[in-house]
Amino acid sequence: MTFITMRMPPRVREWWLVGTLAGITYGLLLFQVSLDLPAGAPLTGRIAYQPLWKAAMALLLARAAWFHQPKQERRWLVTALLFSALGDLLLALPGLRISFLGGLGAFLLAHMAYLRIFIPLIEDLRPHRLVGCGIVLGAAGAMLGRFWPNLGELKVAVSAYIVIVAIMACSALMARLPTPLAAIGALFFVASDAMIGMAKFLSPFDTYQLGIWWTYAIAQVLLVAGLVSGPRERSVCSECGEQR
């Protein structure tokens, strides 16, 4: 933890730590609830104000991102985290008719915002990074093929989501950043989304809920840490006209 936070600006570090603590707290609440329930029983709706608890981590990380520089990158990072918070909120309200599809849409926009950050940073084309990207793309294709018979009317939406997630993860793997934290975070995001897909389209019960939260929380925490930790090599972003 010290290795991660020592590279952050003070204001960013303060809110990042609070956001990380919120994610851990919610994960522990889920674990405590799971102890009193049969294996695979839904954990949603078991905690008072659960949607707010669930969205708190992303909102607090968005506050941390608000102090990040450069300005153009900050906008997209805050956007990604706010859409993530909306997705968390919607997925924590399963009684809502648009819960899953709305959550899927919110996280799709979050991934697109992350993608907008990483694309201008793609410079690391070392073989192990390219191999990692190939594995991600292969896993995404296999996952879509496995889910396909059960997708029904969600075929287009889920296909688009999986494609964007895979591209986001690849762009994070190939982005030149001071640490590998963002790349690791992107891979955790892929793992979390894969478990959501398995729970939704393959398994008859909510087997993966604890794993989904912890991999997702690690993903967001590391993505933010990887982007706000510096200093970076100075280069010119041709699209935004700022120095990085």
Image (spheres, helix red, strand yellow):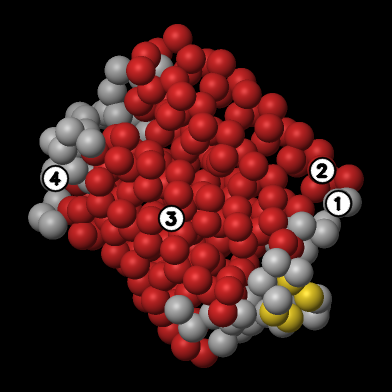
Q: Is residue 41 above or below residue 69?
A: above
Q: Give the crowd class for mark 3: few <14, some 14-19, many >=20 residues within 10 Å.
A: many
Residue 158 in picture, x, y percent from top left: 45, 28
User: Which residue is under mark 2?
Assistant: 130
Task: Look at the numbered disc 2 and give the secondary structure of its residue.
Answer: helix
Residue 145 got which mark? none
Sequence-wise first label, 1 or 4: 4
Residues at circles 2 and 1 in contact by the CB criterion of under 8 Å = yes
Q: In this rendering, which labeled residue sits more in front, label 1 or label 4?
A: 1
Q: In this rendering, which labeled residue sits more in front, label 1 or label 3?
A: 1
**Residue 95 picture quarter:** top left
What's the CA distance linking mark 2 and mark 1?
A: 6 Å
User: Which residue is under mark 3?
Assistant: 217
Q: Is residue 150 above or below residue 132?
A: above
Q: Give the crowd class for mark 2: few <14, some 14-19, many >=20 residues within 10 Å.
A: some
Give the residue at x 13% y 57%: 49
Quadrant where the image shows the N terminus: bottom right
User: Which residue is under mark 4?
Assistant: 46
User: Which residue is under mark 1?
Assistant: 125
Task: Look at the numbered disc 1 and give the secondary structure of its residue.
Answer: loop
